[in-house]
Amino acid sequence: GAVVSQHPSRVICKSGTSVKIECRSLDFQATTMFWYRQFPKQSLMLMATSNEGSKATYEQGVEKDKFLINHASLTLSTLTVTSAHPEDSSFYICSAFTRTSGGTDTQYFGPGTRLTVL
Amino acid sequence: QKEVEQDPGPLSVPEGAIVSLNCTYSNSAFQYFMWYRQYSRKGPELLMYTYSSGNKEDGRFTAQVDKSSKYISLFIRDSQPSDSATYLCAMSGNQFYFGTGTSLTVIP
């Protein structure tokens, strides 16, 4: 079945450093990947939509210069949190969008990356 | 075997019907169980959040967790057209595992 991986699963960094999170679709091609952010016991907040070979579309209120997204191939999208601060500490979750052989649009989620900024 | 299995549907019901959505899982270490509702082009909205086994009720929504059977359910009573959305189950220990979502349409 379709699997989406994220790396790293957990990262702790100092304030001011940059952190790159990878999202990979392991056995299917995803033309579209989504990046979400989740605080404890809250809904997933859509940050941006990442399309292969083009610029990401950011949701209102999300700083595109702070959260850099690159979708270099049909199986890989990366999110870089630049100059991270403690308020950026959160769970970052990606999902990959594909159309099944039956014609159903399906979204597969990654397991999340827990970012802690000291 | 996938960590979480969820029937993708689609599921169509008439307005007022009781809807039952289900997920099964394989990892007995999961402790937190969640149901999300997602409208098109929006982030998944957290509906119910349950720790360990048991039932939890919130308005028309009831979440059940049966850890012995590794089975969770979401019931929607008196379904409304505005309930039409994709419903995702999720569970976590150290990481999140999501179902693929069930597409629900409530017909007026």
Image (cartoon, helix red, strand yellow):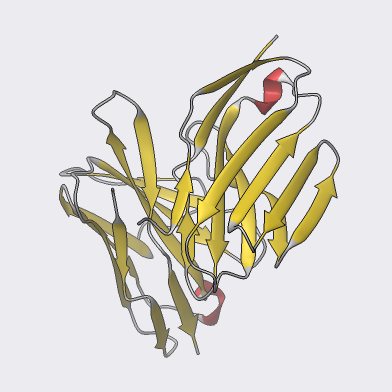
Q: Is residue A13 depicted above or below B24 in this figure?
A: below
Q: Residue at x 38, y 59 (%)?
A: A110
Q: Residue A52, image x and y in percent?
A: 19, 44
Res A65 quadrant in image: bottom left
Could you tell me how many numbered marks the image carries? 0
Res B80 quadrant in image: top right
Q: Residue A117, image x and y in percent?
A: 48, 84
Q: Residue at x 69, y 29 (%)?
A: B19
Residue furthest to the top in view is: B108
Quarter placement of the N terminus of chain B? bottom left
Q: Residue A118, image x and y in percent?
A: 50, 90
Q: Residue B89, image x and y in percent?
A: 56, 49
Q: Is residue B35 depicted above or below B49 in this figure?
A: above
Q: Is residue A91 left or right of residue A95?
A: right
Q: Nearer the viewer, residue A7 or B32?
A: B32
Q: Is residue A115 depicted above or below A33 in this figure?
A: below
Q: Nearer the viewer, residue A98 or A49?
A: A98
Residue furthest to the front in view is: B69
Q: Nearer the viewer, residue A98 or A62?
A: A98
